[in-house]
Amino acid sequence: MFFFLVSYLSTMPSSGISLFQNRIVSLQKERAALEAFPLDELTEIIREVGFTCDLCGRCCTRRFNGHVFLFPDEAEKIRATAPSALEPPPVYDTSDQNGVLYVSGYTIRSKNDQSGSCWFFEGGKCQIYSERPGICRTYPYMLHREPDEKGVSDWRQISGLDQHGTYHADITRDEALHIAGEIKVFEDRVLLQEISFLETMSLYFSTRNLRPVRKKFDDQVRKFRDGSPLRVMVYHSGCFERWSVGKTGAIRLPPCKSTE
Ligand code: SF4
């Protein structure tokens, strides 16, 4: 099982609940920028790239793509049919002063093979193709800003360009316009999910005298690498669900603590 421990705290100011509020403001600006991005420009980029999936299957592995992002309704659907396929994503956001880590939403468990294949990837095919999550439907298209290797943030529209699939296929304008619209809707939903997570975190921390502590985050990462399990709270549908995450797997612990 592959775990990549990442903290967004490295991009946050130094202390206090206002950290969450500052991030919410920044995400709201991001939503406005996304809304303002011209649909025509995205449509033309999609046509120009002309991506076609060649069923290489690389996008269904963590080695190539990291973890699969899930919205709450998608996680619920998977929980109803294949509960063991859900786990906390290995991209923790924050640690409180007690060393408890927080993360927004679930991901699909990966298999213990070399490339970290998705739980549902079997025999070169997706076993839930007609019900696959939104990110698998929009992939490899995207529309969000990411820093490059020099730390300069700019819009990204295609993931893994020239590393998978084939290019320069004829895509009609109508088809590309449809894809562009779907991408914007998807990306906006991602931002709304993050804002909801941060709003709940802000309330949860302030009503329980918790505070985000960077040093605790680093300590927990170190202990995890030495073999200690992590205590993780997963934000899901307005609740935090408790998990214990070890190097060999993750176990959900009852009960779900309502934050309302
Ligand atoms: S859900 Fe299906 S399409 Fe999405 S990563 Fe898993 S196997 Fe691939």
Image (cartoon, helix red, strand yellow):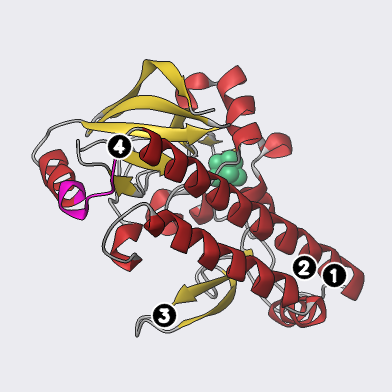
Ligand 1 rendered quadrant: top right
Residue at horizontal 72 percent and vertical 80 percent from the top? 45
Q: Amino acid at mark 2?
A: Ala
- The residue at which mark 4 appears reads as 209
Q: Which residues are magenta?
A: 209-217
Asked if 243 appears above or below 160 in the picture, the reply is: above
Q: Whole-percent x and y of residue 205?
A: 37, 40
Sequence-first disc among 2 and 4 = 2
Q: Residues within 10 Å of mark 2 (few under 14, many from 20)?
A: many
Q: Amino acid at mark 3?
A: Asp
Front residue of this view, candidates 233 and 43: 233
- Which residue reaches farthest top? 254
Do labels 1 and 2 touch, CB within 8 Å? yes
**In the drawing, what numbered circle is on residue 148?**
3
Q: CA distance from mark 2 to mark 4?
A: 43 Å
Sequence-first disc among 1 and 3 = 3
Q: CA distance from mark 1 to mark 4?
A: 48 Å
Do labels 2 and 3 touch, CB within 8 Å? no
Q: Residues within 10 Å of mark 1 (few under 14, many from 20)?
A: many
Residue at horizontal 28 percent and vertical 45 percent from the top? 211
Look at discs 1 and 4 and give the one toward the viewer. 4
- The residue at which mark 2 appears reads as 180
Q: Residues within 10 Å of mark 3 (few under 14, many from 20)?
A: few
